[in-house]
Image (spheres, helix red, strand yellow):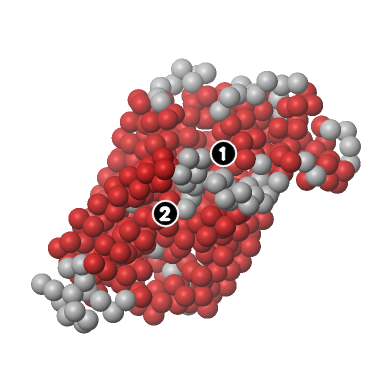
């Protein structure tokens, strides 16, 4: 399909998003940006969270990963689903009782400003890297299919996308994001379902027969119990639980959407249904991956060496113009649904946690919030350009992996605050949060060197969280006393 046609369709999609933003922005107040006036329907939040959680990384990487590790990733997803149940039953009611805008503010009474701002700061750092990386992957695909052939520089394409995201989120923030994410979830799931349908039809057999054959092959194996394998079920499942609680239960981005529901009961219902829909959606992408590889074998197509290029390569070159268009819209929806909520969450966290914006006059609040929102978008733009300049997959992936280390301190600080009636030496909080990821890195290297053949997978964050927790435990004061 000609790049101009793809570009026009993408522009039309953005116009729809802007129309949704205009509609949802009617009658908004200052607080609407942060909590959506607590009026979001729980089922809309639940469905929209699928798009934000899957992101562009899942959209293009999970189908390709089936060629490397079969369906083992689903073991991790089962842990994710269990983690979401924990969040629904325990953390969401706790946050509602506190009636907060930023979830990190719950740390202030027990951990002081140091612990409060350390957790918030690590969240912002993690989100900047994570959101930039996800949008970067989507921008690469858009550049390959649209802007590159048209001779438009990469940075112009990235800037254009961020301007549009800023336009539809800057007025109403999370109130708009809840609804635009719902639309974007529809788009990305439609792209995946349509692609799977075309692939099933291409085999010339009944769809049920093709799926039964696929599910009987080693390439679709889900469970792995070899202890040394990074895909071991127990490591994947437990890591999925811990990672979900750390990356979602202690993450302003995800929790902020849930806090737009009217009460904790509706928020719990939203999270429980979301966990089910999330598992089904990821399994769909795994099946899509199996179909893509089967299609390539059947047609004798030589696939790219990088697994995350498999879906884009086949969708843009072998599955017809309609699938090419849906793929571009799908990857755009997946990337933008995670980027828009990340920008909104980072704006909220910085305004509430560092600027204490609630104590300022309303007009001043809007002025500050808009500039912070613009600054966050600019930071993402610069980080994406840095990724592009590095132009080295191993370096960029290492940076993205490093961002995962920063969630361990967040989880460790929260666990210490929630489960122990102890107050740590507050001046040691920031050093502990910095030292913990470093110790985790060296411990991981040591274990992998000593235990030949053992490779850490997602369980790395469990180690990081435990190290943070233990360091804080070593540096606590007497029960109930402030050490300063």
Q: Is residue 218 above or below residue 283?
A: above
Tell me where residue 152 sits by quadrant: top left
- Classify mark 2: helix, strand or loop: helix
Residue at x-position 50% and y-position 35%: 138
Instruction: Please state which of residues 13 and 432 is positioned toward the viewer in this rendering.
Output: 432
**Residue in the picture at 14% in, 63% down:** 427
Farthest left residue? 484
Can residue 325 be seen in this snapshot?
no
Residue 450 position in % (x across, y down): 42, 43
Q: At x 29% / y 47%, what residue is drawn?
A: 438
Q: Secondary structure at mark 1?
A: helix
Q: Position of residue 210 (x, y in %)?
A: 84, 41
* Chain-order first, disc 2 or disc 1: 1
* Location of residue 418 (image quadrant): bottom left
Residue 470 visible in this rendered orientation of the protein: yes
User: x, y percentage for residue 153?
Assistant: 40, 22
Which quarter of the rendered picture does the C terminus lie within? bottom left
Query: Residue at left 88%, top 33%?
Result: 204
Residue 129 position within the rendered picture, expressed as x and y whole percent measured from the top left: 36, 43
- Residue that mark 1 sits on: 61
């Amino acid at each position: 399909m000609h790049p101009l046609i793809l570009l026009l369709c993408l522009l039309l999609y953005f116009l729809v998003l802007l129309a949704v933003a205009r509609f949802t922005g009617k009658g908004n107040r200052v607080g609407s940006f942060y909590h959506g006036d607590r009026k979001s329907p729980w089922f809309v939040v639940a469905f929209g969270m699928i798009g934000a959680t899957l992101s562009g990384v899942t959209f293009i990487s999970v189908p390709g990963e089936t060629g490397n590790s079969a369906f083992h990733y689903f073991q991790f997803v089962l842990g994710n689903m269990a983690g979401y149940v924990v969040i629904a039953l325990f953390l969401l009611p706790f946050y509602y009782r506190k009636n907060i805008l930023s979830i990190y503010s719950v740390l202030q009474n027990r951990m002081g400003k140091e612990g409060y701002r350390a957790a918030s700061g690590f969240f912002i750092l993690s989100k900047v890297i994570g959101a930039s990386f996800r949008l970067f992957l989507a921008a690469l695909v858009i550049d390959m299919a649209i802007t590159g052939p048209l001779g438009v520089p990469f940075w112009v394409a990235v800037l254009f996308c961020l301007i549009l995201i800023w336009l539809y989120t800057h007025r109403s923030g999370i109130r708009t994001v809840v609804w635009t994410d719902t639309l974007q979830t529809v788009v990305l799931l439609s792209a995946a379902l349509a692609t799977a349908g075309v692939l099933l039809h291409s085999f010339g057999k009944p769809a049920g027969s093709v799926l039964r054959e696929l599910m009987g092959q080693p390439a679709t194996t889900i469970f792995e119990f070899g202890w040394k394998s990074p895909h071991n079920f127990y490591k994947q499942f437990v890591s999925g639980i811990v990672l979900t609680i750390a990356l979602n239960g202690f993450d302003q981005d995800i929790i902020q959407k849930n806090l737009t529901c009217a009460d904790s009961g509706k928020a719990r219902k939203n999270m429980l249904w979301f966990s089910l829909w999330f598992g089904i959606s990821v399994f769909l992408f795994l099946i899509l991956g199996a179909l893509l590889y089967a299609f390539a074998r059947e047609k004798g197509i030589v696939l790219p060496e990088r697994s995350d290029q498999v879906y884009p390569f086949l969708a843009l070159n072998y599955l017809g113009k309609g699938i090419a268009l849906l793929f571009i819209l799908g990857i755009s929806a997946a990337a933008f649904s995670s980027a828009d909520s990340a920008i909104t969450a980072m704006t909220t966290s910085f305004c509430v946690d560092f600027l204490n914006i609630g104590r300022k006059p309303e007009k001043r609040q809007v002025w500050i919030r808009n500039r912070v929102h613009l600054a966050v978008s600019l930071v993402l733009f610069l980080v994406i350009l840095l990724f592009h300049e590095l132009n080295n997959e191993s370096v960029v992936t290492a940076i993205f992996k490093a961002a995962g280390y920063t969630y361990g301190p967040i989880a460790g600080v929260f666990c210490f605050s929630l489960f122990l009636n102890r107050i740590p030496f507050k001046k040691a909080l920031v050093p502990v949060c910095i030292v913990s990821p470093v110790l985790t890195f060296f411990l991981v290297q040591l274990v992998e060197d000593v235990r030949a053949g053992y490779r850490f997978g997602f369980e790395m964050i469990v180690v990081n969280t435990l190290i943070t927790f233990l360091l804080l435990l070593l540096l606590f004061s007497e029960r109930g006393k402030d050490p300063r």
